[in-house]
Amino acid sequence: MLSRRLAGLLIVSAAAVSAAGCVVEPPPRPRPRPVIYEAPPPPVVEVIAPQPPPPPIEEVIPPPRPGFIWARGYWHWNGHRYVGVGGHWETIRPGYHYVHPHWEQRGDGWHFHVGVWVNG
């Protein structure tokens, strides 16, 4: 009976010794996600010119380029006079069509419309 008691005591002692050496680690802290900062979109500014724009800009349109459309140049009103802005390539967006920059006359002057992609 002593050997049984001794064996039980040894088992309990071994369990206590092995448990004393255990370290319970806290769960890993979640890593913070990287924050991606982007420039805010420019504010929408409606440009109204008091006088009509000059005739369309005459520019040499480059040969077609697969996957792109040529956005024609236009006249920009800088607050005092019209300044020419050259054309550029726009990447084609399937399912959309491109409306080129243009001026529209209304009762209070000439309104500028930026080039945009329109669904359809």
Image (cartoon, helix red, strand yellow):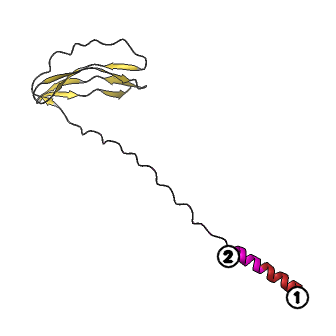
The N terminus lies in quadrant: bottom right
Q: Is residue 16 toward the left or the right of residue 86 in the image?
A: right
Task: Determine which residue is flagged by label 1.
Answer: 2
The C terminus lies in quadrant: top left
Residue range (magenta): 12-41
Q: Is residue 47 toward the left or the right of residue 93 in the image?
A: left
Q: Is residue 14 magenta?
A: yes
Going from N to C along the chain, the mark reached first, 1 or 2, is 1
Residue 105 occupies which quadrant of the picture?
A: top left
Look at label 1 and name its amino acid.
Answer: Leu
Task: Determine which residue is flagged by label 2.
Answer: 20
Kindly identify the residue that appears in the image at 80 percent across and 83 percent down: 9
Magenta stretch secondary structure, dominant = loop
Kindly identify the residue that appears in the image at 41 percent across and 26 percent down: 93
Outermost residue on the bottom side: it is: 2
- Residue 71, compared with residue 27, is above or below; it is above
Residue 109 occupies which quadrant of the picture?
A: top left
Kindly identify the residue that appears in the image at 77 percent across and 80 percent down: 12
Question: In terms of secondary structure, where does tag 1 sit?
Answer: helix
Q: Is residue 102 toward the left or the right of residue 16 in the image?
A: left
The crowd level at tag 2 (other Cα within 10 Å; few <14, some 14-19, many 20+) is few
